Structure formats: C-alpha cells, structure tokens
Amino acid sequence: MFAGASSSSRGGSTADAKPDLVQWGLEYARNFIEDKLKRPSAEDLLVEEDIKLLPKLQPRIAYLIMAVNVGVYAAGLVSGLIDGSDAQQDYFLALAKTDAGVEAGEYYRLITANFVHDSFVHLAGSSYALATVAPAIEEVLGWDIFLAVYLMSSLGGNVATFTFGDALTVGASSGIFGLIGALVAYLWRNRSLSKTSEQLNSIVGILIFNLVLGGIQDTSIDNIGHVAGLLVGAYLGAGLSPKMVSSIDKHTIQESLDEVKPAEPVKLDVMHVSHKGALRRWAAYASFAATLCLLAAGTVVTRTGQLPMPKGLDLLSF
C-alpha cells in the first residue's frame, strides 16, 4: 500500500509513485466490490449465536395467574375480616373441588379449585413456582400454549381427582405439574439443546416440594391431580410445543469450514424455531377440553344417574 510513497522518499520522482497508487486503488476497489457481492462464508455465518430460541417476549401470563391466585386468597381473608371466620370458610368451600358440589351441577369447581389455596404456605409454594420457573416455560412455549397447558392440566387434574378420588381439592399444583410435563416434552423433542440446567434445578425443587406436600395426609392437595396434570401437560407439549429445526445445510457448512480452517472449533447446530399452525393448536385445545368435560359428565351420570344443569358461581351470600 505504501510502496510508492517509500520509493519517492528515497529520491525517486513523484511520477514514479503514481502507477503504484493507481494500481493499489484499483485493487482496493475490486476487493471491496467482491467482498460485498460474494456469498458469506461459513465463518461469517457462524459468528452469531449457534442456537436461536423463540423471540424474547416478556412473559405475562405466568405473573397474571399468580396475581389471580393472590387476589382470590386475599378476597377470602377480607371476607373473614368483615363477616367472620365462617364466611371465610364458606368462601373457600364455594370454590374448592368437592365431589358433592360437582355432582350437584357446580362444574365450575373443576377450574376454580386451581386458584384457591388453603394456607399462606400453600399459596407461597405456588407463587414461587409461578414466579421462577413458569416465566421461562412461557418464553419457550409461547403464551397461548402456556395458557392452554396450564388450564387443561388444571382441569385434567381436578377431573382425575373427581373420577378416581373423593378428597376436597384446591391448589395450583396440577397446572404447575402440567407446565413441567410440557417442558419435559419440549426438551425431549429438542434433545440437542443443553442450556436448561438452571431451569431443571428449580423444577426439581418444586417437584419434590409438591410431591411431599401431596403425600402428607389431611391436606387438600392430591397426588392424583399432580400425576394427571403432569401427563396432560406432557401430552400437549409433545404435540404442540415448538420444534428446533436446522436452518442451514450442515454438509455445505462443513465444506466451507474445510476451506477457511478456523482457529477454534465451530458448532454446526444453527437452528430456528418451527411452530405448529395456530388453527391446529386452537382446534387441539378445544377438542381436548371437550374430552375432559365429557369424562367429568360421564362420571357424574355414573354416580347420580342424571346430569344436573350447570349451577352458577354465587358468592354474594357470603
């Protein structure tokens, strides 16, 4: 680049330097144009992250569910402060899953029970799960799959306890176990991913906490609901969770790497997210919800010999 200038400083004429400078300018321009027009090399393509997950959307549904749980619990405390402990107990029993209530046509209990907690410790455990693990799962699954898994797992857990048990049931654990099941299914579908250690550590703690709590006698938590919620979430996650697929031909990349010979090893797992179609997902939600409702209705008919008309949620008398 500086050959002409150096020769002139050693006594050569300025005219002698001009051909060197012109030649350098032409070569620079040609190299610049070729650099802009050439196909990117494998080294250029792999400078960025080798794994591209879902767009980093702010999780909101997880925190909304936690706020609803806290609000329902606070409303029960307020009813107790205003009208006494009997009113607080009536409020709790009006929302919990009881076999007698469901058999009488109060089908709403199969959903509302998931937002009711029988103690502050119980509420704290659910809130911890929803505040730590659930937001990460929402980012991975997307808000609609996350919400559907939570609600369907909650419904499935309560239908299972109604069908196979007879305990009074409350708590968000069925929905939380469903989210865990969906995450496990997602990881199974995407076994090449490895950046999940922190999430899995939190999940193990929550899983153990809820199973131990569910195994204690004389509680309103039932491991039947836990297992059912886990299975529902795994089923939905296996069918609807996003799939990581290769976005670049690895054979082409390897050929390019053989040419450029990078100094450090380069990962070849360049991927992007492939989602199921929205119409297919919502059709799956509707059909699965209908299946759970039919199972609950069949249990009511088997036990009572009839299917009572649905009764509304009435808390005004408490």
Image (cartoon, grey):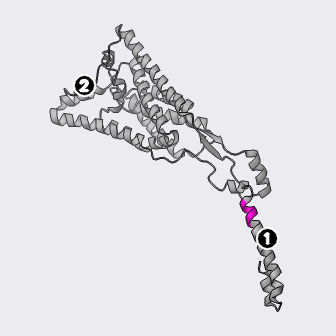
- Span of residues in magenta: 32-36
Identify the mark nearer the N-term, 1 or 2: 1
Q: In this view, does 51 lie above or below 243?
A: below
Q: What residue is rendered at 32% in x and 13% in y? A: 308
Residue 91 shows in the view: yes
Q: Residue at x 74, y 55 (%)?
A: 39
Which is in the foreground here, disc 1 or disc 2? 1
Q: Which mark is residue 314?
A: 2
Disc on res. 27: 1
Residue 121 placed where, x, y %? 32, 38
The three-letter amino acid code for the residue at tag 2 is Asp
Please check the rendered image and state whether residue 76 is part of the magenta-colored stretch, yes or no: no
Image quadrant holding the C terminus, namely top left
Is 122 left, or right, of 234 in this rendering?
left
| Quadrant placement of the N terminus | bottom right
Mark 1 residue type: Glu
In the image, residue 169 above or below residue 1: above
How packed mark 1 is, by other alpha carbons closer than 10 Å (few <14, some 14-19, many 20 or more), is few
Above or below residue 106? Residue 253 is below
With respect to residue 190, does 284 lie above or below? Answer: above
Residue beneath the point at 71% across and 61% down? 36
Dot 1: what SS? helix
The residue furthest bottom is 11
